Amino acid sequence: MAVFTAVTLDDLTLLLKKFPIGNAIAIKGISSGIENSNFFIDTERGEYVLTIFENLTFAQLPFYLQLMRHLAERGVLVPAPVPDQAGELVVPLHGKPAAIVSKLEGSSQMAPQPVHCAAVGTMLAKMHLAGRDFALQQPNLRGLDWWNETTPLVLPFLDEHNAHLLRAEMHFQSAFAACDHYHRLGRGPVHADLFRNNVMFIGERLTGFFDFYFAGCDTWLFDVAVTVNDWCIDTGTGVLDAARVRALLDAYHAVRPFTADEQAAWQPMLRAAALRFWLSRLYDLYLPREAEMLTPHDPTHFERILRERIATPAPGLFA
Ligand SMILES: Nc1ncnc2c1ncn2[C@@H]1O[C@H](COP(=O)(O)OP(=O)(O)OP(=O)(O)O)[C@@H](O)[C@H]1O
Ligand SMILES: N[C@@H](CCO)C(=O)O
């Protein structure tokens, strides 16, 4: 279940008095998702999604909501936040921050073909370009600093085989983050969690990216690597599917051409993207937050992907 904070139709009626989207008609909790309480809401003006943020603070939220607004205004398909009558995108509800965004049509494509990967690559490149003039700055809060903080917390839970892998990969990634190629990589706001369950499709048509609540400023290549590590793999083995990788990368490259520095950084970046989710899944499994009510995601999936990326070079970014 993923409604940590309950909201009744009466609560919604009161809340919507502050929003220019008509009166409340219905509210329905959304069962998927592990971070926030989400609701589909119907109003006299249409369908929206109400999110109550269970972990993010009032101070952190403007970055995410303003970013979504910035991207939506530039034609990137993302949910558009709805400002209240005072122009606020984040409002208190039951003492927690909340926001209303437009509802995307469609559903997640959990068995993507090259055509879906190409659509994701195109929209991801458009998103990176559209984010270049976004004024707010917030680091990727699940970046190298967080990995450094988290590694000693999870190491005691690992067997020697995995502890060795984690220590060795942290060593490798620290050196990578210090190298010249890395510092020349293009940067900006990135989604940083663009998995299959965070993109909507109707058939082969992409209708939107959502769940921006891990977004932050980081290298664009990190975003591409996170996306490829989920969209272009055999989920049983973590092995990359060459046709889907090619489709995603070629589509991205056609909108924002990759650079030689990005090509040089590609293999270590795929490992970095695998490490990021291996670590967060280990952390969620061994050090669960009190409010956590869901079965954590399986860390061994990303351990497998990391080992596979170390063992087998991925197709290059471009020929
Ligand atoms: N703007 C939107 N339009 C349509 N559906 C949405 C929208 N936002 C969220 N949803 C629906 O709500 C579900 C949960 O949302 P979301 O993934 O953002 O939750 P979460 O708690 O942040 O989850 P997680 O971190 O596990 O991905 C999605 O799978 C999707 O079905
Ligand atoms: N995409 C993350 C969950 C957080 O959104 C994972 O699969 O570990």
Image (cartoon, rainbow, N blue to C red):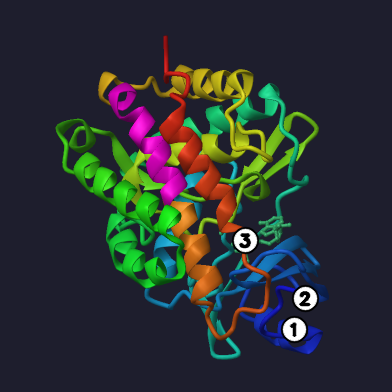
Residue type (three-letter) at the residue carrying disc 1: Thr
Residue at 56% over, 60% down: 81
Q: Is disc 1's CB within 8 Å of ligand 1?
A: no
* Viewer-nearest of discs 3 and 2: 3
Seen from the viewer's position, the closer of residues 296 and 307 is: 307
Q: Are marks 2 and 1 in contact (CB under 8 Å)?
A: yes
- The residue to which callout 3 is attached is 297
Q: Residues within 10 Å of mark 2 (few under 14, many from 20)?
A: some
Residue type (three-letter) at the residue carrying disc 2: Asn
Seen from the viewer's position, the closer of residues 285 and 7 is: 285
Q: CA distance from mark 3 to mark 2?
A: 38 Å
Residue 283 in the image: state x and y as whole percent: 47, 68
Question: Does label 3 or label 2 sit earlier along the sequence?
Answer: 2
Residue type (three-letter) at the residue carrying disc 3: His
Is residue 198 visible from the viewing direction of this image?
Answer: yes
- The residue to which callout 1 is attached is 13
The N terminus is located in which quarter? bottom right
Residue at 23% over, 40% down: 176
- The residue to which callout 2 is attached is 23
Instruction: Give me the disc on residue 171.
Output: none
* Viewer-nearest of discs 2 and 1: 1
In this image, 307 relative to 201: left or right?
Answer: left
Q: Secondary structure at mark 2?
A: loop
The C terminus is located in which quarter? top left
Range shown magenta: 262-275
